[in-house]
Amino acid sequence: MKLFLKCIIYLLIVVCLAAASILLYKAHPEVQLAFIIPGIFIFAYSMISDDISVRHRLRFSKGK
């Protein structure tokens, strides 16, 4: 239940972030937004994946 609640909260954050970035881009279409918005999404993805403890399928440490 706790993981489900985290996923719902993170989903709402990502949707709000996407809506805010679209509104921000409409109001201020500067060139810097092309670099700031993807950086915010990459940062949010890294925080979410660290918090949910997603295991990556590619492991380089234990190879046969």
Image (spheres, rainbow, N blue to C red):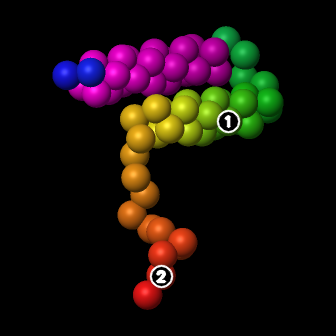
Please, which residue is most extreme toward the left here? 1
Quadrant (top left, top right, bottom left, bottom right) of the C terminus: bottom left
Q: Dot 1: few (<14), some (14–19), or many (≥20) neighbours within 10 Å?
A: few
Residue 18 is marked as: none
- Regarding residue 41, the answer to whether it shows in the image is no
Nearer mark to the viewer, of 1 and 2: 2
Please state if 64 lies on the left or on the right of 30 as rendered: left
Taking 9 as reference, is 53 above or below it?
Answer: below
Q: Is residue 62 above or below residue 45?
A: below
Image position, residue 54 (x, y; %): 40, 46
Q: Secondary structure at mark 1?
A: helix
In the image, is 8 to the left or to the right of 42?
left
- Report the front residue among 26 and 38: 38
Q: Is residue 30 visible?
A: yes
Which residue lies at the image location 26% right of the left edge and 21% below the top edge?
2
The residue located at (36%, 17%) in the rendering is 9
Image mark for residue 63: 2
Bounds of the magenta span? 3-26
- Give the amino acid type for the residue marked by disc 2 in the picture: Gly
Question: Residue farthest to the bottom?
Answer: 64
Kindly identify which residue carries mark 1.
39
In magenta stretch: residue 22: yes
Estimate the x, y position of residue 49 in percent, counting from the top left. Answer: 46, 39
Q: How many marks?
A: 2
Left or right of residue 48: residue 34: right
